[in-house]
Amino acid sequence: MATPGFSSLPLSTKGPPLNAWGRFGPDDQLGTLNLITPSVLAAAAKTEIRTGVRVSLDWPLSTPAYPSYGRNGLKHEIHRRGPEGRVVNDDILEFNTQGSSQWDGLRHYEISCSGGITGRGILLDYASWVENETVHFDPLTSMPIPLTHLKQLQESHDITISPGGGDILFIRSGYTAAFNTLSISSQRQLSERPSPDFAGVEATSDVLRWIWDSKFAAVAGDMPSFERSPLGGGINDAYKAEEVRLEGVGSLHEVLLGGWGCPIGEQFDLEKLADMCKKEGRWSFFVSSVPLKVPGGVASPPNAVAIF
């Protein structure tokens, strides 16, 4: 199926700005995951799985203990039950599905029932790139990750995007690494800031055009919000003037989730993945992620693993 040009959006006059409603038919429930066809998936497994080395991409459910955005942390209770003389333990978990590593935009149950989010992944290791290029960057502040930098990084690492589409994009900002250096008290203070200031991809029409033209099936990062947070700029925002306002919408989230059905992954643990990519000398891999099967669920831990 030919991809409509970005300039042709919106596809539906009944939908929000830049929507792609109807792109995969009137009753579609998968959105951009339709780009991962059986043949695309088989080709990804054939070309990307070479050594069998596996790397988990999930943060522990208990991290962070104090999530930002007013969310609650994990509550874990071990319930002992069973007849006398016999030990039977049950786990009872209470957690916000967006408190730790998570896929956002899984409102449609069909996504988790269809085999999850599985295919060829590519990593743009922005944290290492800014270090090598001596570019000032702090993932614990509201700083944009410019598209120009991502394209330079892609070129320097000779990363090829599949021309037929269906790749799953990962961007490492260094957020989880920076967070892990904080004391428990500092982690709590971070969550209690009046504004959830975190670095993320710049919210511009050019970024949306790049994601659309690249035909990514899903996008993810290690940041609390894939795009710069808070959406629309921080309290003391020195970068607001640099970001071009989106065409009638307020954030990448609105277009990617509500307009295109493109899942957004956040707070993925990409540290060991980056190390393995450096060791292997390649920035692509096979990724398998099977979200929880919760009918009507908004988000889910990814249960994701990269395979080399």
Image: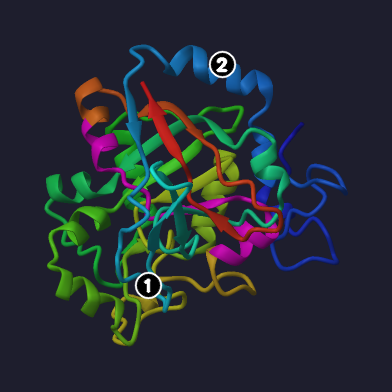
- Left/right placement of residue 263 relative to residue 200 reads right
- The amino acid type of the residue labelled 1 equals Glu
Residue shown at 22% from the left, 79% from the top: 189
- Please, which residue is most extreme toward the front here? 84
Compared with 34, 268 (above or below) is below
- Left/right placement of residue 145 relative to residue 7 reads left
| Residue indicated by mark 1 | 242
- The amino acid type of the residue labelled 2 equals Ala
Q: Nearer the viewer, residue 8 or 224?
A: 224
Label whose residue precedes the other's in the sequence (2 or 1): 2
- Comparing marks 2 and 1, which lies closer to the viewer? 2
**Magenta segment: does it hold 255?**
yes
Cα separation between marks 2 and 1: 40 Å
Instruction: Give the quarter of the image for residue 230.
Output: bottom left
Quadrant assignment for the C terminus:
top left
Compared with 190, 294 (above or below) is above
Q: Nearer the viewer, residue 295 or 107?
A: 295
- For the record, the magenta segment spans 253-275
| Residue indicated by mark 2 | 43
Residue shown at 58% from the left, 47% from the top: 292
Residue 28's x, y, as percent? 80, 46
Q: Nearer the viewer, residue 199 or 307?
A: 307
